[in-house]
Structure formats: structure tokens, C-alpha cells
Amino acid sequence: MRSPEQVLHEVFGFPSFRGQQEGIVRDVCAGLDALAIMPTGAGKSLCYQVPALVRPGCALVVSPLIALMNDQVRALRAYGVRAAALNSQSGDGGETIDALQNGQLDLLYVAPERAAMPGFRQLIARSDIALVAIDEAHCVSQWGHDFRPEYRQLRALCDLLPGTPRIALTATADVATRADILDQLGIAPDRMVVAGFDRPNIRYEVAPKVNAAKQLLAFLDTQRGRSGIVYASTRSQTDKTAAALVAHGINARAYHAGLDGVERARNQDAFVRAEDMVMVATIAFGMGIDKPDVRFVAHLGLPKSIEAYYQETGRAGRDGDPAVAHLLYGADDIARARGFIGEGGAEKIAADTARLNALIAFCETSGCRRVPLLTYFGEPAPPPCGNCDTCLSPPAMRDATEAARKLLSA
Ligand code: ADP
Ligand code: MG
């Protein structure tokens, strides 16, 4: 039997596991269940693909999208792995079923509809199954954003295979959804691993707003020749800020939903190609934009939540090189955000309030910024990172220096 490291090196050609992959792989290889919560791009697939090749038998992988499934099968075959898919595009699947029964498959991807069929269950019950992986596992939960009723049938399928590890994977960060996934799939709560939310190359900086326009220019002066995004709260603030930056000789453009489609597309294209452009935008900008060398993301006010902040700042430094997330916030932002809370039932108000308080706690901490950020997503508190404003210049020391300076100049 090959070891996980051998499979990683020899099949996939990667030198090492990332983050929590190693622990999850080791546990699943040993027959334990897992729920892996990791952000998009963290490498969830290897968490079941490596055990699939270490353990005897074929791994069954449930995936909700045909396009996703086909991509994975294609990529695995390119590595020389025996992978196949059964979905509405794969015909009757006769050859694939033969391969499964003859022990000639390493991974079998199936759509949830297929996995729920009685005939398919019977086939699986008499096959040699290495593990069951449930990708995009938030689909099992009505709390999640893509509920798929067929996912509710997966528990019955897993229960047909006692002793076979089940591993669920998702990028969702929501606590209610996580609990529901564990419950619906019959995975013990202590088998949950939350990991990979840290973006070590991003330096987090937060400052109270005094004069936003002046502070933004001072920040952008430190970023000359680089590309980045400045998030503004409203369309008019977006237009005004872009114009002010242009007047200062900065290569800036605006992006918001009030611009016509042609202009939006033109500005977005220019940004993706440019090496030194500042895009001043509302949150309408960013989804699906593939620009690895965004060097900074600045916020001219409070984002909607820590999740939103994480998403928006996560657009910086995708290439792994140093990047900065620079947030300015003021009492007016907090008052406005509080004003938005109040619609919906008591439960929603409580949840929205907790969310806002977590965001404010992140802004006001005198400790490492990564502690409130990562613990919000359920990760253990990291040691001081050395790459955020409070680590680089502790507030207590700043105050002390200030006091000392006053004392000396008195
Ligand atoms: P997720 O499902 O979490 O969004 P994927 O499994 O699709 O992420 O992986 C994202 C990318 O990271 C893929 O290109 C994958 O090959 C790569 N990757 C994952 N793990 C490693 C690793 N240990 N070393 C190098 N590359 C990795
Ligand atoms: Mg994935």
C-alpha cells in the first residue's frame, strides 16, 4: 500500500501538503470520518483524492454540478488516475459500472440524483468502496445557499457502508449550516476541521477615519505603481473619489452598477490588464475577476460583515506576493450599520447584531488582527502574525511613544 506522501509526490507531483490537508488525509486513510471547512482554492479535493488512492477500493464522490465533475475527472485522468463520472450526460454508464465491479476504478463521481436511486444503492452496497466524499456539502442544509433535496438521501447511502469513511467538504463558514451538515450526514462533531482561511501574505491595517480623502491619498502614496481596489459605500462616493484621485495624477477609474454595461466592461478590462490602476468601486465590483496581482484593497468605510470583508480583501495578493488590506472606519459607519439592523424577526436582529459586533471587535482590537478574523471562521487563534498593523506597531507602544514624545517636548 502506498503512503499518502507517496501518492502526493508520485501521482500529483506536489512536494507537500498544504495546511490541514495532511491531518485530514491521514484520518480518512485510517477510516475516520471528516467534515472539512476550507475556503475556495484551499485544496479540498486532495483531502479525498489522496485517500482514494491509498485505500483499497473505489472512492465514491458526490458532486452537485456536472461541469465540476467533468473537470475533476479530466484533471485526474491527466494524472493517470482511473476516474469516471455518472451523470445525466454520461449515457447509461454501463462501461463505468463494469469498471467499478471489476475493481478498475479509483474514483467514481456521481450526481446526487444518481446516488439517491435504489438501483445505484444496491450496486454500491455490493462494491468495494474506499470512502464516500460529499463535495459542496452545504447543499445538504436548508440553511445553506444551494439546498439540494437529494443530498438528504446521502445519509442512507453512507449507512449502507458501515466502516467506510465519509468525508464532507464545503467552503461555507456559517455555523448553523455546519451543524446541520454534521447532523444530516451522521458525522461526529469532533470530526470537523476548519482551516485555511488565513492569507499570510495580506497585511491587515485598520485606522479610524479622521479625514478619509487625505488618509486615502497618504495610503495610495505608499502604493504608487501598483494596482488595487478602493471600496466606497455609494455610487456618488465612488465617482467623487475616482475623480479626486485622477486629479492627483493617479490612474484611477470608477465601477458601480449605475454605469452602463459598456463602460463597466471597459473599466474592468482595463483594470485586469493594467499594472498600476486603482479601481474605485462599490461592492458590485470583484466577483469573478481574475487578477492575481491586485496589490491592495482599501475600504473607505465598514464592510457589511467579516465575511464580506474577507471576500473583498481576499481579492488582493492571489499570486502569493505581499499585499495590503487597508480599512478606514468611523463612528458614522457604525451608526449607519446599526440603523440597517431592525428588519426581520428577533432571531435575525440578534444574528445581525452579533455579526456587526464581531466586525467592530476586529476593527478595535489592540491585538493581532488575525485572531478575531480567523476565530470568526472557527479556526484556532493563531500566534501573533507579525504582518498586521497591531503586530508591527502595538497600540500600547504607540501610545507610550506618543506620551514619551510629549514628555520630552514639554
Ligand atoms: P477547493 O476545492 O478547496 O476550492 P481545489 O481542491 O480545487 O480547491 O484546489 C485548488 C488548487 O490548489 C488546485 O489547482 C490544486 O491542484 C491545488 N492544490 C491543492 N493542494 C495542493 C498542494 N498540497 N500543493 C500544491 N497545489 C495544491
Ligand atoms: Mg472544490
Image: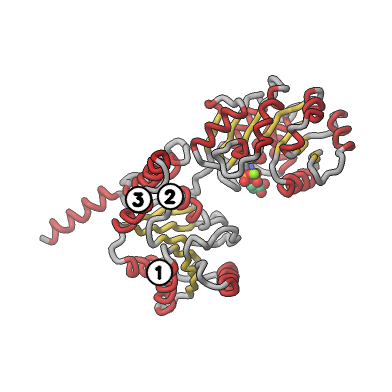
Q: SS for tag 3?
A: helix
Q: Is residue 333 left or right of residue 26?
A: left
Residue density around tag 2, few if under 14, some if 14–19, many if 20 or more, within 10 Å: some
- Residue 55 at what x, y percent from top left? 73, 28
Q: Is residue 189 above or below residue 177?
A: above
Ranked by sequence position, the earlier of labels 3 and 2 is 2
**Count of marks overlaid on the render:** 3
Residue 65: image location, x then y, percent: 70, 45
Find disc 1 in the rendering and name its residue.
237
- Local SS, label 1: helix
Instruction: Using the numbered discs, state the Cα–Cα distance from disc 1 to disc 3 in whole angstroms.
Output: 22 Å
Amino acid under label 1? Answer: Gln
The answer to whether any part of residue 60 appears in the image is yes
Which label number is shown at residue 406?
none
Whole-angstrom CA distance, mark 2 to mark 1, is 20 Å
Question: Which mark is in front, 1 or 3?
Answer: 1
Residue found at x 44% / y 68%: 235
Instruction: Check the picture and name the quadrant holding the N terminus.
Output: top right
Residue tagged by mark 2? 305
Q: Residues within 10 Å of mark 3 (few under 14, many from 20)?
A: some
* Badge 1 density bin: few <14, some 14–19, many ≥20, Cα 10 Å: some
Q: Nearer the viewer, residue 187 or 143?
A: 143
Mark-to-mark CA distance, 3 and 2: 11 Å
The mark found on residue 363 in the picture is: 3
Query: For residue 124, what is the image quadrant?
Result: top right
First in residue order: circle 2 vs circle 1: 1
User: Which residue shows up at 89% across the image and 37% down it?
Assistant: 95
